[in-house]
Amino acid sequence: MAPERKKLTYWDLLKSWVLWTFFSHSCYNYERLQALGFAHSMVPIIRRLYTTKEQISAALKRHLVFFNTEPNVGDVIHGITAAMEEERANDQPITDEAINSVKTGLMGPLAGIGDTLTQGTVTPILLALGIGLAKDGNLFGPLVYILLEAAVIWGVGYFMFFQGYKMGRTAVERLLEGGLVKDLITGAGIVGATVIGALTASFVNLTTPITITVGQQVVKLQADFFDKIMPQLLPLGLTLGVWWLLSKRKSPIAIMGYLVLVGVVGSLLKVF
Amino acid sequence: MQITVFQAALIALFYYLAQSPWLMGMGYWTLYRPLIGGTVVGIILGNPAQGAIIGATINLLYLGFISAGGSLPGDPALAGYVGTALAIGSGIDVNAALALAVPIGLLGSLIWFGRMTLDAIFVHWADRYAEEGNTSGVAFANIVPPQILLFVICFVPAFIATLYGPSAVKGAIDFLGAKVFHILMVVGGMLPALGIAMNFRAIGRGQTLPFFFLGFLLFVYLKISVIGIAAFAVVFAFVYMQLHKGGVKSGA
């Protein structure tokens, strides 16, 4: 009689996703980054699929290797891995190397896409909305940010995890190579850039008290010159200048130093 | 105002929570951000609106904050919690608070460095549990020891800085006078440019530069709110994608 097929339940997968979402960075470290978080998230999967001490030990060790990705887009890898473990437990010829190569092959690209989307675009846009409200002391600012951010982050994480389990490796790889992801990043980048432009105008402050006396006329450099060309001209110039320095591969810490220096010297010379 | 021991402990506890996993991973996305941290500090110190304003301003510097591969350029959370507490405690202006938050954020990376280094110990504990096939042991190694460590290295410095910091800041500013105050305001006004530019660099793909100007112009000339501009931006993005697709098709 053939042994009964081992099957992961919805609850096993949900538990795995919840454990990952909670504890992915609980023991984050320079040696193996999210390795322990990954192994921990596989515990419900391993408990369902394997019974002997040797099998469980081998599975835990298999997942205690170096791992690092963006945790909410990248958990598609956990879904794929769960599906592969399930096949392996049903005596399909899936080696340790096969599982490991899927994890290491996908974690880099998904970290890139995930960080660009979650940390680089969605979070700053939502923060900008919250900051825009909060700068006048409106407490809906932080509240709205928390609700929207939680909905997006948990929503994306849940969706990706279960898609990974359902679709498997090849389908995910095909999706990554397709145009949809690129379109998503471009669209999000446009929204992000527009909002960032508005933030430059509303939050960067730089004015000059310099006055120039021409004959009997006193010209206020700020009010009579810069503001006439365009309001907030100096903040725009400053932000573009910093952006240019960043694109010249100057480190952010060094640029911070320049800004402090310019601010201090400029104030002492009464330029600002 | 005088910050009490209880208030300082509460602020330090929230700073730990921001770094911890206990909110189902949401700490990093919410409490960790100065917008939220500043508001929390404001609530604890009895001035939520002022906390939200200061937190929002400090957050601008960390708008483009990306923790990638475990390397952080500073600690937004420490800057948010301690920076706001120092500002409200010593009664300084918002822009000056931002300038003050910068060195605090830089010092915070030491906490991050300590955690990332010492946590490697517990992975080796997990290796031993894995050898025994002990799944609960692996879960234990991922949660209990690293979180005790994290609590200690987060709570203690934040507590001390919050309790004793405000009088030190107030003393320093009283001693140095109004001149320094003006300098802090100028520097604090300039620093958001860095956070904004870093974020723009992270998402900028060349073709988004016109949209940066568009957002800027909509704000200065039409005085549309940031939320309004975001709504316009979604429309622009859709139109752009449609035109872009059409272009690709006709070119093919």
Image (cartoon, coloured by chain):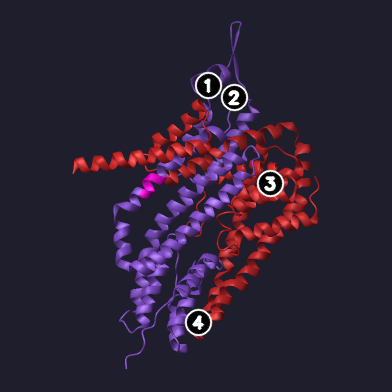
Chain colours: A purple, B red
Q: Nearer the viewer, residue B229 or A118?
A: B229
Chain part drawn in magenta: A184-188
Q: Quadrant of residue B93?
A: top right
As helix, strand or loop, the secondary structure at mark 3 comes to helix
| Tag 2: amino acid | Thr
Tag 1 near tag 2, CB within 8 Å? yes
On residue A226, the disc is: 1
| C-alpha gap between disc 4 and disc 2 | 64 Å
**Compared with residue A47, is residue B241 higher up or lower down, i.e. above or below?**
above
Q: Are marks 1 and 4 in contact (CB under 8 Å)?
A: no
**Badge 3: how crowded within 10 Å, few (<14), some, or many (20+)?**
many
Q: What label does residue B224 carry, if any?
A: none
- Choose mark 3 or mark 1, whichever is in front: 3
Give the position of the C terminus of chain B as an image quadrant: top left
Residue at x-position 56% and y-position 59%: B26
| Residue at image mark 2 | A208
Element assignment for label 4: helix
Marks 1, 4 in one chain: no
Q: Nearer the viewer, residue B116 or A108?
A: A108
**Residue under label 3:** B84
Question: Is there CB contact under 8 Å for labels 3 and 2?
Answer: no
**Do the residues at discs 3 and 2 belong to one chain?**
no
